[in-house]
């Protein structure tokens, strides 16, 4: 105890967290290289950096999921030599992971108070308290709902509520906002600001730089496992931040809008479900069609119906003027439709398999001859996409589970690009992707349409849809509420139709 006191006096007590020269290596990667960061009490401290920069690794060390190789961590005035997730929670450090950490087969309430039912006086207390926490962040999910039934954004809200339930001194949020609606996001901002007033610190990791500027007091920029700079947000310009993140100057965040719209190749009519009402639209060759709507408005349902992922009856689809039946995803793929899904973990990636396998998965059949797989072709395809999408990995044989969040995502994008589909549906294709790699994905989208395919782009990031689409449809309450030419429309008028 005496030793700790001395340290506390030695160290500046204005800091809740001091990380000094922390290093961490994985086979083939130096994930953290002498990282030094100091987080003050009662501030929002942003951390930005490219996919694979080491942000999540550092947070996992702080929370006791990984052990550091070297360096020193001082939390709340005490040296933390070794910690486990449970100990760090007890010490007052909570983390909301980039990938969800919830039990799908349990209810929302049970998840929030998992292992602490006695503390909150049984199931009744669990649900009452859980409800309050959720209400606090403007979320009205029934706490008895199974987590498996929640949307991505709802799961994230549960994660946030769970973190709040621990009365933490430092809450780490690793891309907490990536799938929240504007309202939910405002709710989150409000909560974060309230926490700040109570002296709680937040570490906020995000690829959405607007959020960093709006929310954070201080920002640390990381690149390739090292800290490049830490500055008060007021002293940092957007350009400087981007340049420091990617290590080079990026002139534009978007390429020029593709301009190659041809004849009609797809049409859907009479799409009706419990949630959708009379959805009908068409798509042209070489067109990027943007679908804009709030989370829950029906965007995902529309594309799941087109892809045959949900059983829907009564709607009609034409591909190149020919009536086409799509009863399941197999029909869709046969018709030339591919889907980059929103929730990549659940619907796309096989985490225990290699980067190579995940990328070639959708085209494997093509390369099997007489029962044998042409390994060199497989390798070529995988390497091509690793390069084109700048997937950061020690090699194509690395298991996807060991890649950073954004790099996992790029693997799925690569997989579907390889199928060279007539229509590529992209649901939030740049979520969790850093600015530099976003630009690469936009360029690839452009190449795809220029080669004669078409894209349906679903995105919550309005600037992305405005800059990349040839046409925009707004979705509100399961209906198409407007159609716009992005070159002539204002954000204001789109938002009016999105909100209904
Ligand atoms: N368990 C692991 N085994 C092997 N390598 C790992 C492991 N976890 C992370 N890495 C590697 O460490 C590096 C840093 O990854 P990390 O997840 O910290 O990046 P990040 O900054 O959070 O990126 P993103 O923005 O994509 O989430 C990457 O090269 C990643 O592949
Ligand atoms: Mg990460």
Image (cartoon, rainbow, N blue to C red):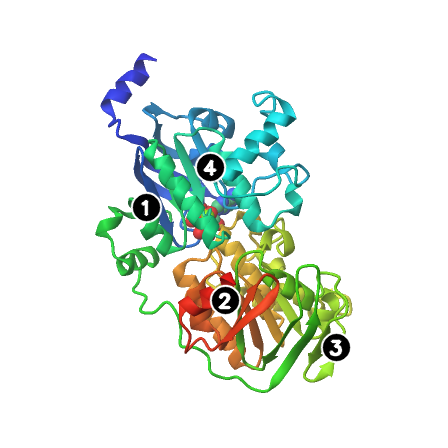
Direction top: furthest residue: 2
Left/right of residue 193 with respect to residue 28 in the rendered view: left
Q: Which mark is residue 324?
A: 3
Q: Within 10 angstroms of label 2, few (less than 14), some, or many (20 or more) residues?
A: some
Q: Which residue is mark 1?
A: 216
Quick one: 356 or 478, which is closer to the camera?
478
Residue at image location 44% in from the left, 66% down from the top: 464
Q: Which residue is mark 4?
A: 95
Q: Secondary structure at mark 4?
A: strand
Left/right of residue 52 with respect to residue 4 in the rendered view: right
Left/right of residue 243 with respect to residue 113 in the rendered view: left
Q: Between disc 4 and disc 1, whose residue precedes?
A: 4
Residue 420 visible in rendering: no
Contact between marks 4 and 2 (CB within 8 A): the answer is no
Q: Which image quarter holds the N terminus?
A: top left
Tell which tag, 4 or 1, sits nearer the viewer.
1
């Amino acid at each position: 105890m005496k030793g700790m006191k001395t340290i506390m006096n030695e160290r500046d007590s204005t800091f809740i967290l001091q990380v000094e020269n922390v290093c961490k290596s994985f086979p083939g990667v130096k994930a953290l290289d002498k990282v030094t960061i100091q987080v003050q009490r009662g501030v929002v401290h942003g951390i930005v950096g490219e996919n694979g920069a080491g942000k999540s690794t550092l947070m996992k060390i702080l929370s006791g999921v990984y052990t550091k190789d070297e360096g020193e961590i001082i939390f709340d005035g005490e040296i933390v030599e070794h910690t486990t997730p449970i100990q760090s929670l007890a010490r007052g450090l909570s983390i909301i992971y980039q990938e969800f950490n919830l039990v799908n087969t349990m209810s929302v309430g049970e998840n929030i108070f998992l292992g602490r039912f006695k503390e909150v006086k049984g199931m009744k207390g669990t649900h009452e308290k859980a409800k309050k926490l959720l209400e606090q962040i403007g979320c009205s999910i029934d706490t008895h709902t199974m987590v498996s039934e929640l949307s991505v954004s709802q799961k994230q809200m549960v994660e946030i509520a769970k973190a709040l339930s621990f009365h933490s001194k430092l809450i780490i949020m690793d891309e907490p906002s990536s799938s929240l609606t504007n309202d939910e996001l405002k709710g989150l901002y409000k909560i974060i600001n309230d926490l700040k007033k109570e002296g709680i610190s937040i570490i906020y990791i995000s690829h959405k730089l607007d959020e960093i500027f709006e929310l954070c007091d201080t920002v640390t920029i990381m690149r390739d496992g090292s800290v490049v700079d830490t500055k008060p947000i007021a002293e940092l310009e957007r350009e400087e931040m981007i340049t420091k993140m990617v290590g080079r100057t990026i002139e534009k965040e978007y390429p020029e809008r593709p301009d190659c719209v041809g004849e009609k190749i797809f049409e859907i009519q009479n799409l009706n479900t419990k949630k959708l009402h009379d959805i009908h639209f068409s798509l042209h060759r070489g067109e990027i069609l943007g679908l804009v709507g709030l989370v829950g408005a029906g965007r995902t349902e529309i594309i799941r119906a087109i892809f045959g992922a949900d059983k829907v009856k009564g709607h009609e689809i034409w591909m190149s003027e020919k009536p086409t039946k799509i009863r399941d995803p197999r029909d869709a793929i046969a018709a030339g439709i591919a889907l980059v899904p929103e929730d990549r973990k659940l619907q796309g990636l096989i985490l225990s398999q290699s980067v190579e396998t995940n990328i070639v998965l959708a085209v494997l059949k093509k390369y099997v001859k007489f029962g044998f797989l042409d390994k060199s072709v497989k390798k070529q395809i995988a390497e091509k996409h690793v390069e084109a999408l700048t997937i950061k990995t020690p090699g194509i044989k690395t298991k996807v589970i060991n890649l950073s969040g954004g790099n996992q995502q790029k693997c799925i994008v690569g997989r579907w690009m390889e199928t060279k589909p007539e229509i590529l549906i992209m649901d939030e294709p740049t979520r969790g992707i850093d600015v530099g790699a976003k630009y690469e994905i936009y360029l690839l989208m452009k190449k795809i349409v220029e080669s004669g395919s078409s894209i349906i782009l679903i995105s919550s990031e309005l600037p992305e849809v405005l800059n990349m689409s040839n046409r925009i449809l707004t979705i509100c309450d399961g209906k198409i509420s407007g159609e716009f030419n992005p070159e002539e429309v204002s954000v204001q008028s789109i938002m009016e139709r999105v909100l209904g």
